[in-house]
Image (cartoon, helix red, strand yellow):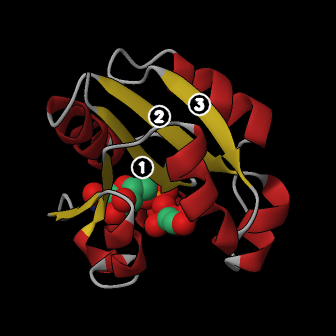
Amino acid sequence: MKRVITYGTFDLLHVGHINILRRAKALGDYLVVAISNDEFNALKGKKAYYSYEDRKTILEAVKYVDEVIPEKTWEQKVQDVKDHDIDIFVMGYDWTGEFDFLKDYCEVIYLPRTEGISTTQIKKDLMSK
Ligand code: C2G
C-alpha cells in the first residue's frame, strides 16, 4: 500500500488539477490531498473563490482522491508525512526543489504542469467577458 500526498489550493477545479491528481494517485494506492485553508491561502497571497469547506467537498468527489486534510502552515509537511504514513510526496514542477527537505522522509516527485490553464487565467478570462 503506497500512500501519496499532494498540496494545493485547488480553487475553481480544472483539468490541470485533475491531471496532477490522476498522476499522483497512479504513483500509489491511496492519495491524501492537503487543501490550503482560507487563512493559509492569504499567506500565499491568494484569495480562493470557493471556501475551504466547498473546495474540500469538491475534491472529495474526485475519484482519485482518498482523503482531504487542511493545509494550515508551510511547516506541517514533515508531520503530515509521518502522521499519514506517506511514501511519496508529489507537486507540480513549478515547485521543483522547494520541498526537497522531505527526501529524508519520503520520495519527492515533481510532475509536469498542464499548460494553458490556471485558476488565475480563468478569473482573468471571466473578468474580460
Ligand atoms: N497544477 C498543474 N497544472 C496547472 C495548474 C496547477 O499541474 N495548470 C498543479 C500545481 O503544480 C499544484 C497543484 O496543481 O501541484 C495545485 O495547484 P494550486 O491549487 O495552484 O496550488 P498551489 O498554490 O501551487 O499550492 O504547500 C504547497 C502549496 O499549497 C501549493
Report x, y in % for residue 4: 34, 39
Q: Residues within 10 Å of mark 1 (few under 14, many from 20)?
A: many
Occupied quadrant, residue 48: bottom right
Q: Is 60 rendered above or below residue 55?
A: above
Residue under the image location 16 percent in, 37 percent down: 27
Real-space Cα separation, disc 1 to disc 3, in angstroms: 10 Å
Q: Name the residue under label 2.
A: 32
In the image, residue 7 above or below residue 39: above
User: Residue pushed farthest right?
Assistant: 39
Q: In which quarter of the image is residue 15?
A: top left
The answer to which image quadrant residue 22 occupies is top left
Query: Is label 3 in contact with label 2 (beta carbons under 8 Å)?
Result: yes
Q: Decide: is 88 above or below 84.
A: below
Q: Earlier in the sequence, mark 1 or mark 3?
A: 1
The amino acid type of the residue labelled 1 equals Thr
Task: Report the residue that reaches farthest toward the bottom.
Answer: 97
Label 3, label 2: how many angstroms apart (C-alpha)?
A: 6 Å
Label 1, label 2: how far apart the Cα atoms are: 7 Å
75 sits left or right of 30 in the view: right
Is the CB of the residue bearing disc 3 within 8 angstroms of ligand 1? Answer: no
Res 14 visible: yes
Sequence order check, earlier mark of 3 and 2: 2
Residue underneath mark 1: 6
Q: Quadrant of ligand 1?
A: bottom left
In the rendered image, which residue does mark 3 sit on?
Answer: 68
Quick check: is the Cβ at mark 1 less than 8 Å away from ligand 1?
Answer: yes
Q: Which residue is drawn at 65% across and 73% down?
A: 74
* Three-letter code, disc 3: Val
Front residue of 22/6: it is 6
Q: What element carries label 1?
A: strand
Asked if the residue at tag 2 contacts the one at tag 1, i.e. Cβ–Cβ closer than 8 Å, the answer is yes
